[in-house]
Amino acid sequence: MLSLVAAGFYIAVAFATVAAAFRARRSGQASAHAIVWIALAFLFVVLAVSRMLGLEDLLEQHLREGLRGRGSYDDRGGMQSVLVATLIAATGIGSFAFLLFARGRSLLRGRRNLAVLIAGSAGMALILLVALRVLSFHQTDALLYGPLKLNWIIDLGASVTVIAAALFYVRLLPSAR
């Protein structure tokens, strides 16, 4: 039941991002705005389908079976730690590079640009979260599913951030006449 509620919320976020993309196109905003909103809509539709069909769990099981088939399952910790460290480092480097690019292109100025930047960053946080859940490394699982329930906080927080940014963006732009 909880998965269906989450999927429904993801669909609501997808609709809000599609609305922001249409408003961006109609009001002549930078094409990058519409691209980011459509990419986010796609992400949230994929997340909804994944939630409804249990695709994350299936992928995690598939990875485990592949390791068992190769006889590497008992030694997976070393490989998982390298993958998690690489994923986190790549995310950090990518985020820093994106901020430098955004700063150089003046994307950090103006409320519309900032709404797009914040929504895109929240979408990237969700992608990182899904990757960490699929890798299922014991230490990150302890953080994600431990007493603080960071999995829920990050998932809900990023989703609420995207829908709020999309609705804010739509409110900022004049409607087409």
Image: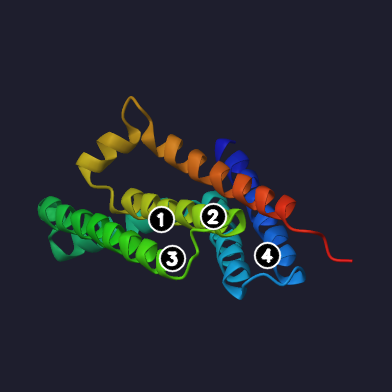
The residue at which mark 3 appears reads as: 102
Q: Quadrant of the N terminus?
A: top right
Image x and y of residue 132, in percent: 32, 51
Of mark 1 and mark 3, the one earlier in the sequence is 1
Q: Amino acid at mark 1?
A: Leu
Q: Residue at x 65, y 57 (%)?
A: 17
Query: Tag 1, which secondary structure?
Result: helix
Q: Quadrant of residue 86?
A: bottom left
Amino acid found under the numbered disc labelled 4: Ala
Which mark is on residue 21? 4
Q: Is residue 163 above or below residue 5?
A: below
| Comparing labels 4 and 2, the label whose residue is closer to the camera | 2
Closer to the chain start, of discs 4 and 2, is: 4
| Mark toward the start of the polypeptide (3 vs 2) | 3
Amino acid, disc 2: Leu
Q: Which residue in the structure is indicated by mark 1?
A: 58
Asked if the residues shown at circle 1 and circle 2 are in contact, with their CB atoms under 8 angstroms apart, the answer is no
Residue corresponding to mark 2: 114
Q: Secondary structure at mark 3?
A: helix
Residue type (three-letter) at the residue carrying disc 3: Ala
* Relative side of 110 to 79, left or right: right
Q: CA distance from mark 1 to mark 3?
A: 37 Å
| Dot placed on the residue nearer the N-terminal end, 1 or 2 | 1
Callout 2 crowding tier (Cα within 10 Å): few <14, some 14–19, many ≥20: some
Q: Residues within 10 Å of mark 4 (few under 14, many from 20)?
A: many
Q: Earlier in the sequence, mark 1 or mark 4?
A: 4
Inter-mark Cα distance, 3 to 2: 10 Å
Residue ID at (43%, 40%): 154
What residue is at 26 percent from the left and 35 percent from the top?
Answer: 142
Q: Give whichever of 1, 108 is nearer the camera.
A: 108
Furthest toward the bottom, the residue is: 31
